[in-house]
Amino acid sequence: MAGPHFANTTENLPRSEQFADFRREAEVFGVRCSTLNGREDEGFARRVSGYAAGPCVVMSFQTEAYLQRQDAAARTSELDHWMIGLWRRGSGDFDIDGRSIRAQAGQLHLQSVLNSHEGRYNGQEITFLLLPRDALKGLEAPLDLRCKTDSSNAFHPLLHEYIRILWDKLPDALPGDFAAIGDATLAMVRACMMKSPDFIAAANAPIIATQLALAKKLIAAQLESPALNAQTVANQLAMSRRQLCTIFEPEGGVDRFIRASRLKVCRSKIAAAGNDQTIVSIANALGFDNMASFGRQFRSQFGLSPSEVKGLGVTPPGPERFAEWAKGRLPS
């Protein structure tokens, strides 16, 4: 599991210096920050971490409450990016073109680094996409316009899910994966901004692949549960059984995947050198009560009987590649 490419926190600073450190960093981008009570010596929790993915940056931003306003004279950075923030916790109240706008958990909020919104952050956790202008040619005008309005409904809802899953999956990425992640992210943003069925269909692959990966993890954790079936997995993923069956079509269906996964675990346990468990006890623990049927299914999947496999040893599976997820393909 890879750590973030960059991380910054005030936790290791003296409490009296924590807000000042945050304030100085914000000033680089032409933003003046202040505490709610005007005091800077009472401590200020801030955690920032993120990953560079091609031309994009994916970043988690967590702070206590504070006020911010623009101060172009303080700016030293020429960073010209849009920021799409998925608010995962907390809220913010902003003055945007003379209107009061609230951003809150579950919503997307779009702004420009060069023209950050003035207002109050009420203590929050936000997952940001930082997107350079030259990576989204043709969308400059509509994105700039959306920065001056309530942008909570500016994008197709698919983008909410994509950003959430993207951040949760980034620790699994390998160094060679990040270019593909950046490409997939830009394609998703473009599709969700245009709201075109063709664009959405083309960019939907990473979401489907990720839902499939999450479902597989849930299944793997419950293989010994007699209650495991397509409906229980669908309930845990908050989707319909029909949706679950659709994403499992490449695997031959949910029930077939569960059975194949149980057989793989049986094979590993039976093959493990020194395993003093009997074949019957291993099969029973994984839901196979009819040994004749178990034997036929085992031979059909592996080409050997359970007794022929016993003691052969186990070949560990290779790691899943994050780049395959970004392309919409995730191997079993």
Image: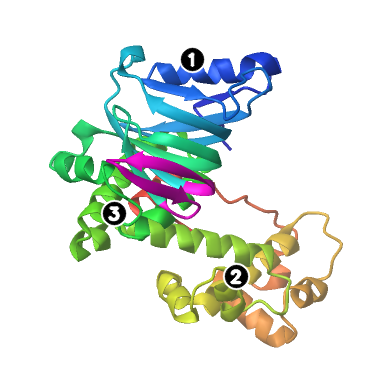
Q: Secondary structure at mark 1?
A: helix
First in sequence: mark 2 vs mark 3: 3
Q: Residues within 10 Å of mark 3 (few under 14, many from 20)?
A: some
Q: Nearer the viewer, mark 2 or mark 3?
A: 3
For image coordinates 17% across by 39% down, the residue present is 140
Q: Position of residue 71 (x, y in %)?
A: 35, 19
Q: Given this view, does label 1 or label 2 mark the residue nearer the observer? A: 1
Quarter of image, res 267 = bottom right
Between 206 and 236, the one nearer to me in the picture: 236
Q: Amino acid at mark 1?
A: Arg
How far across and down, in percent of the image, does residue 144 sit? Answer: 21, 40
The mark found on residue 94 in the picture is: none
Q: Residues within 10 Å of mark 2 (few under 14, many from 20)?
A: few
Location of mark 3 (residue): 154
The residue beneath circle 1 is: 24
Camera sees residue 76? no
Identify residue for label 2.
236
Quarter of the image for residue 141 reads top left
Give the distance between the C-alpha atoms of the residues marked 3 and 1, in whole angstroms.
32 Å
Residue 201, compared with residue 128, is above or below; it is below
